[in-house]
Image (cartoon, rainbow, N blue to C red):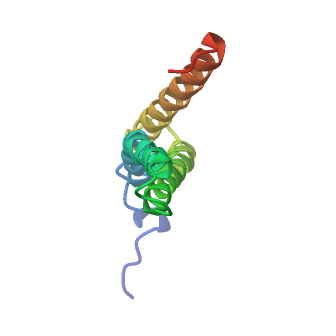
Amino acid sequence: MSYQPPVDYYQQPQRTGNRGLGAGITSIIAAVLSPVAAVVSIPLGIAAVASAMSRYNEGNDAWWFGALVLAGTAVVLAIVAVVSGLIAVFRAGRMNAGRITGIIGLAITAINIFGIVFMVFLVLGSGQGF
C-alpha cells in the first residue's frame, strides 16, 4: 500500500500580491496621456479656426478633424484611466501594489478633471475668456 499524504499537504501556491497591478499601471499611463492629447488638440483647434477665417484656405477641414480626433482621444483615455483604476482598486482586495497604482491613476485623473472644471469656471466667471 502506498503512502497518501493528507489533503492539507497539497497547498495552493501563495499569491504574490500583484493582483490589479496591470490595470493600475494602465490607469496611470492613461491618466498622464489624457491631458497630453487634450493640450495637443488645442493648437490644432486654433489652426482650424485660423484656417476657417482665412480666405486663401477655404474648405480645409483637416485641422478640425485632427483637433476632434485628439480631443476624442483625450476623453477615451480619461475613461480608460477611470475604469482601469477602479478595476485595479477592486481587484486588489487589500492594500498592495495594484491598489496603490489604481489609486494613483484615479488621483491623477481627478486632478485633471478638477483642473478642467476650474478653468471653465474661471473663464465663465471672468466673462472675458482667455
Q: Residue furthest bottom?
A: 1
Q: Nearer the viewer, residue 54 or 13?
A: 54
Q: From this viewpoint, is residue 18 visible?
A: no
Residue at image point 61% right, 11% down: 126
Where does the N terminus fall, quadrant-wise? bottom left
In this rendering, would 110 be left or right of 39?
A: right
Q: Nearer the viewer, residue 100 or 73?
A: 73
Residue at image point 44% right, 38% down: 105
Location of residue 43 with respect to 114 vertically, above or below: below
In this rendering, would 13 be left or right of 61?
A: left
Location of residue 124 with respect to 39 vertically, above or below: above
Residue 79 placed where, x, y %?
56, 49
Residue 114 placed where, x, y %?
56, 25
Residue at image point 53% right, 42% down: 89
Residue 29 placed where, x, y %?
36, 47
Q: Residue furthest top?
A: 126
Residue 77 placed where, x, y %?
48, 50
Q: Nearer the viewer, residue 127 or 69?
A: 127
